[in-house]
Image (cartoon, rainbow, N blue to C red):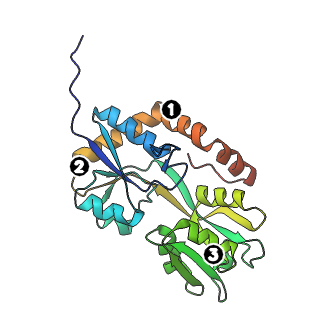
Amino acid sequence: MAEEKPPGKPLVFGMELSFAPFEMLDKSGQPTGVSVEMAHALGKFLNRPVEIRNMTFDGLIPALKTGKIDIILSSMTATDERRKSIDFSDTYLNTGLCALVGKNSKVVKAEDLNQQGVTVAVRSATTSQTYARDHLPKAKVIVLDEEAACVVSVLQGRADAYIYDQIAILQHWQRHKANTRAILKPIREESWAMGLRQGNTELKDQVNAFLKQFRADGGFDKLGEKYLGEAKKAFAAEGVPFVF
């Protein structure tokens, strides 16, 4: 029997643990969710212990660049703008930006967002903020730090729409069907990937090898069924392709 190699140094992941069901805390305050299980699977693949550090989303890239974390695994979209300062693994999930709108809002379709008199809420340091900056010059855009504040702005009528990720918008709509509508067809399609320090080709190659193996072994299918079963049904009912 071959001798097992001793575990390597901890692999430190940065996540904002407030985006269920991908990155969140369980009832006992422990990290859980899709990304957390992916992190532990990657650690097992590389025979390295896993450490997860909870931090604000806008602090993830600075933490990676300064060496406080090794990998960003926090539902982060791989964009050209972010590639100027960090590297990305192969993508592991396809999603898109969509919108939560007030029940009585004049916004009915994505094209209605870019017009005078429309107020759009976005979360700071996200691709929704970038999208609004580049594509909604006629709308009034309010930038908020917290996702909950963006949702409340729609519920209270201070914003006509909140632009964010498909899964999040679906969940908020399901919680507030009496007061909101959801535009689930993507305004813009996006892909998530793990963030890595520039030049760390060895770890990047290892992560990509893991993703390929994890997908082949049905890992993403299992996570989808465990955490996203209801979302999968809801997307099917709306005629929108599922993220995995």
Residue at image location 64% in from the left, 41% down from the top: 229
Task: Estimate the spatial distance between the alpha carbons at disc 3 and disc 2, rounded to whole Å.
Answer: 43 Å
Q: Is residue 130 left or right of residue 54?
A: right
Whether label 3 touches label 2, CB < 8 Å? no
Q: Is residue 161 left or right of residue 178?
A: left
Task: Estimate the spatial distance between the alpha carbons at disc 2 and disc 1, rounded to whole Å.
Answer: 26 Å
Residue farthest toward the front in the current orientation of the protein: 28
Vertical order, 185 against 157 (above or below): above
Vertical order, 50 against 179 (above or below): above
From the image, which quarter does the C terminus lie in?
A: top right
**Label 3 amino acid?**
Ser
Residue at image location 65% in from the left, 48% down from the top: 231
Vertical order, 150 against 140 (above or below): above
Q: Secondary structure at mark 2?
A: helix
Mark 2 — residue? 201
From the image, which quarter does the N terminus lie in?
A: top left
Task: Estimate the spatial distance between the alpha carbons at disc 1 and disc 3, rounded to whole Å.
Answer: 39 Å
Q: Is residue 85 left or right of residue 227?
A: left
Vertical order, 40 against 57 (above or below): above
Residue at image location 67% in from the left, 78% down from the top: 160
Mark 1 — residue? 218
Whether label 1 touches label 3, CB < 8 Å? no
Asked whether 75 or 131 is in front, the reply is 75
Residue farthest toward the top in the current orientation of the protein: 1
Mark 3 — residue? 153
Q: Residues within 10 Å of mark 3 (few under 14, many from 20)?
A: many
The mark found on residue 41 in the picture is none
Residue 230's image quarter? Answer: top right
**Label 1 amino acid?**
Gly
Residue 122's image quarter? Answer: bottom right
Residue 67 x/y as whole percent:
22, 56
Residue 126 x/y as whole percent:
46, 68
